[in-house]
Amino acid sequence: MRMSSKAKILVVEDNPVNLELFADLLNVGGYEYVNTSKGEEALEISRKESFDLVLLDIQLPGIDGLTVAKTLKSNASTKHTKIIALTAYAMKGDREMFLEKGFDGYIAKPVTMKEFLEAVEGYLKGSNEL
């Protein structure tokens, strides 16, 4: 993680309402962030910039979130970046599935401001367990 005041986060979410909500919440939390609605763009951005955390929707047009996570975890320059699934799929067995797919955690949608910011901070500090 960066030693500056707040972490840099990549948000990948194809729903414009959710994307705006996450951006607003990260602004409230004082985080620096970059957002995109496409998996292909997320991979391109991550080649040019480094991030402390990636918040990644699973269902994306084109390259889905599972493929983006696998690609990031297999790249030497991004394999240590924490990747958190943003998903409406918070069912029994999802924990194991996300771990197997290379995610470091997940945040279930819909989110509340408090839960979202606490989860982001926890994952950045390494204190959240999936």
Image (cartoon, rainbow, N blue to C red):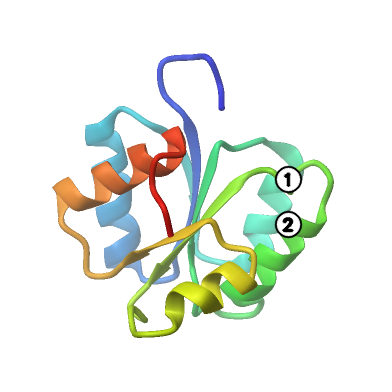
Q: Position of residue 93 (x, y in %)?
A: 44, 84
> Any mark on residue 98, and which?
none
Left or right: where does residue 114 sit relative to residue 16?
left
Crowdedness of circle 1 by 10 Å Cα count: few (<14), some, many (20+)?
Answer: many
Residue nearer the viewer, 128 or 114: 128
Farthest residue in the top direction? 4
Q: What is the spatial separation of the Cα atoms under label 1 and label 2, in whole angstroms?
A: 6 Å
- Whether residues under marks 1 and 2 lie with C-beta atoms below 8 angstroms apart, the answer is yes
Q: Residue at coordinates 71% horizontally, 67% vertically from top-left?
A: 70
Crowdedness of circle 2 by 10 Å Cα count: few (<14), some, many (20+)?
Answer: some
Position of the C terminus, as image quadrant, is bottom left
Q: Residue at coordinates 41% horizontally, 23% vertically from top-left?
A: 6
Residue nearer the viewer, 37 or 111: 111
Left or right: where does residue 26 sit relative to residue 9?
left
Hey, which quadrant is residue 77 in on the image? top right
Farthest residue in the right direction? 76
Hey, which quadrant is residue 20 in on the image? bottom left
**Residue 79 appears in the figure:** yes
Q: Return the residue at label 1.
A: 78
Task: Say if 39 sits above or below 6 in the image.
Answer: below
Q: Return the residue at label 2.
A: 73
Q: Residue at coordinates 56% horizontally, 27% vertically from top-left?
A: 1
Check disc 2 and give the amino acid type. Lys
Task: Say if 122 sits above or below 113 in the image.
Answer: above
Task: Say if 65 sits above or below 125 in the image.
Answer: below
- The secondary structure type at the circle numbered 2 is helix
Residue nearer the viewer, 112 or 49: 112
Q: Position of residue 79 (x, y in %)?
A: 73, 48
**Residue 60 appears in the figure:** no
